[in-house]
């Protein structure tokens, strides 16, 4: 604030540097918001894939629990 009240060359240069710093901070915040949105989108896709993989794992576990079909004997059948 003081740099905008004083009218020396140094005060003007300091005021310009302060404004540039605030502009850079604003740009960084905007970039971070964009990155945060992209990460959020990736996390949502990952959650969807994880739920599908979970369903597939449950199906595979159910298939393991099924009894094996009876084995057929090899050879000739004899009638008693």
Image (tube, grey):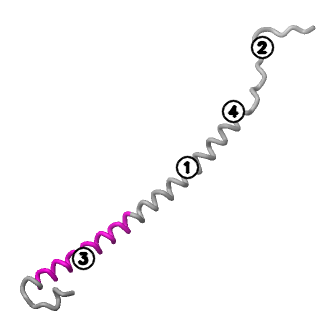
Taking the spot 21% from the left edge, 87% from the top edge, the residue there is 1
What is the C-alpha distance between the residues marked 4 and 2? 23 Å
Badge 2 is on which residue?
73
What is the C-alpha distance between the residues marked 1 and 4? 21 Å
Residue 14 location, quadrant? bottom left
> Marks 4 and 2: which is nearer the front?
4
What is the C-alpha distance between the residues marked 1 and 3? 40 Å
SS majority, magenta = helix
SS at mark 4?
helix
SS at mark 1?
helix
Badge 1 is on which residue?
50
Magenta stretch: residue 62 in it? no
Q: Earlier in the sequence, mark 4 or mark 2?
A: 4
Badge 3 is on which residue?
23
Residue 78 in the image: state x and y as whole percent.
87, 8
Magenta stretch: residue 13 in it? yes
Taking the spot 42% from the left edge, 60% from the top edge, the residue there is 39
Q: Residue 39 bears which disc, if any?
A: none
């Amino acid at each position: 604030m003081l740099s905008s009240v004083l009218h020396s060359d140094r005060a003007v240069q300091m005021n310009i540097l302060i404004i540039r710093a605030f502009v850079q901070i604003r740009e960084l915040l905007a970039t971070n918001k964009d990155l945060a949105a992209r990460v959020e989108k990736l996390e949502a896709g990952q959650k969807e894939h994880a739920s599908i993989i979970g369903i597939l794992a449950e199906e595979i576990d159910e298939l393991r629990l099924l009894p094996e079909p009876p084995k057929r004997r090899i050879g000739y059948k004899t009638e008693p």
